[in-house]
Amino acid sequence: MDSKKTNTTYTADDIHVLQGLQGVRKRPAMYIGSTNSAGLHHLVWEIVDNAVDEALSGYGDKITVTIHKDGSCSVLDEGRGIPVGLNKETGKSALELVFTELHAGGKFNSAVYKSAAGLHGVGAAVTNALSVWLDVTIYRDGGIHHMRFKDGGSVIENPLEQIGTTKKHGSFVRFKPDPQIFSTVDFKWDTIYNHLQESAFLMKGVKFVCVDERTNQEAEFYYENGLEEFINNTNQNKKALTPVINFEETDNETEISTEIALQYCYEDYNETIFSYVNNVRTKDGGTHEAGFRTGITRAINDFAENNKLLRGKKLEGSDIREGLTAVIALKIPEGLLQFEGQTKGKLGTTEATSVVQNLIYNKFTYYLTENKEIAMSIIKKCTDAQAARLAARKAKEEARSSKKTKQEVILSDKLTPAQSKNYKKNELFIVEGDSAGGSAKKGRDRIYQAILPLRGKPLNTDSVSLDKMLHNEEFATIINTIGAGFGQSFDIEEIKYGKIIIMTDADTDGAHIQTLLLTFFYHYMRPLITSGHVYIAVPPLYRVFKEADRKVIQEYVWDDQGLEAAKKKVGAGYKISRYKGLGEMDAVQLKETTMDPRSRMLIQVSIDDPFLVEKRVGILMGRDSGVRRKWVEENVDFNGVDTFIEEVK
Ligand code: TSJ
């Protein structure tokens, strides 16, 4: 196919086009965020978003993403097909522009609601620019049309031509990412699977298929009651207090359409709110979330007041949102769209506040009136939360006014405390096992590092009652040591350590212990994670060393790639020890490699994507231990909590 055709390269007219694509290659992170695995998958989302836009416009109800054996990935839709006719002035097709001009996609798209592609998506040209080749097949107007690019879009390997006839319509785009750009070109099944499932929840009636030809895995997502199934999926390991409650309405004046699904669960002290605008996550919330919060708070307060269910004081927003899971999905016409914040993750559209607030107030009030029993259970949950909050506040005030100072709080005898009272700088190491705990105690900097050894596996707090958690010695000790309460009364201002560092062996058990601890923090001290106080210590995997002239030359190695370099550095005659656990290191080694800020490696735990966290916590903590073990073994990026590595100083 290639050999007979002459390659078409760009002429002088096309210089600006090339510059655009080359700009993407020069600074890929500016367009796709990073060149790691997240950036790699961004290439897929750019393409998928276009297919999603087509489905949103009402064309095509099936989107298939395939990971191919040759390292390429493809997306197929059943829409109208990207237009292939030539523009008389430019002599170019819309198709060519889509793949060579930045942001061209949106220009041709007249859909009322624009999704990611039309919003802050950067377009299919970016995927082309960062691929070694990209191949397009369009089924349209009875014909099969084909075009192929290579070398980051700088060469048209096959100009657009009709290669056959068909009755089908749709677009097929396949591309192979450039390994010179990305640190990894390994597409991850889990990543694509989760993204497509999330899209399917938001686009009821559209089928998403995920295929991995490397492993012959295939999954299909099709949800008729999108958001309801989203909530069911999120809450599958929780105890439901109410059914999933759905509301839907399009505002006549603004043409903003809103869908909301919500559910209350027992023994959950957090609120989990996912919001979307035109199928794009608004991870920093914004006007629609604000409207939701005000609306639901007023609806419940007014209902409770009218039915004389309040004990005096009004419920606060936090009382009402304890144990609440909600998904808010808006479709906003382009003219009203406004995003804020550095990553554009926050909705700024002012109209959205009153639209959502009125909708939830009116419809939820009506629902409560019509469903008295459910209403009663919700109000009880809220007034219980209120009572707990007031009691905690009272206890805190009493503790303050009594003579007992902070230092007098009795700390566990297991804890080796730090000497300093500089809480911001202090570090708490939660260490797996007594023996490693012993080394850590010796190796620590006693001024600001404290050690708390754990015996065995901590309790799984995803499946036990609050009461049982509080009676668990390990967690009672952790709560007491951190010193800032838990659940709704957790107060981040009171924490006694700026860094809480989980230190376990680098094996499956260690990963499981991390997961259990993070599950606990996630459920009972979430602000500790969201404001970046929780870390995972990463011990080295190897020590490469030799003795020469009565001196020891040594290098610690954290990953397999680093091993060769370390061998060269140490030189002939080296020996390697492989660390299977923390216990194999003596106090000096543990200090040097894992505890001393000048040389250690830490992973800061963050919650980038609560959708994934909820889901993975579900997998990890659910009843199916087989699924869990498989997951733990396959995922080095620990625990379903997205992580990044702190720079090694
Ligand atoms: F990303 C992409 F451009 F490569 C891409 C676009 C990838 C995939 C898999 C699908 C698509 C795509 C684009 N699917 N459907 C469309 N639709 C159009 O481009 C289109 C078709 C007709 C009309 C029209 O007004 O007649 C308008 C548009 C935008």
Image (cartoon, grey):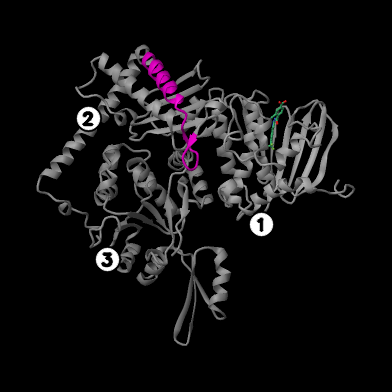
Quick check: marks 3 and 2 in contact, CB under 8 Å?
Answer: no
Q: Earlier in the sequence, mark 2 or mark 1?
A: 1
Find ligand 1 in the image and state its quadrant: top right
Quarter of the picture containing the N terminus is top right
Q: Residue at x 48, y 25 (%)?
A: 228
Q: Which residues are magenta?
A: 339-366
Q: Give the secondary structure at mark 2.
A: helix
Q: Give the secondary structure at mark 1.
A: loop
Across and down, in percent, residue 142 comes to: 82, 26
Q: Nearer the viewer, mark 2 or mark 1?
A: 1
Amino acid type for the residue under numbered disc 1: Gln
Circle 3: is it few (<14), some (14-19), or many (20+) Cα within 10 Å? some
Q: Which residue is mark 2?
A: 387
Image vertical order of residue 399 relative to residue 330, above or below: below
Given the current orientation, which residue lies at the most extreme left position?
403
Q: Which residue is mark 1?
A: 180
Q: Give the secondary structure at mark 3.
A: loop
Q: Is residue 350 magenta?
A: yes
Amino acid type for the residue under numbered disc 3: Arg
CA separation in Å, label 2 and label 1: 59 Å
Q: Residue at x 51, y 21 (%)?
A: 257
Q: Which residue is mark 3?
A: 446
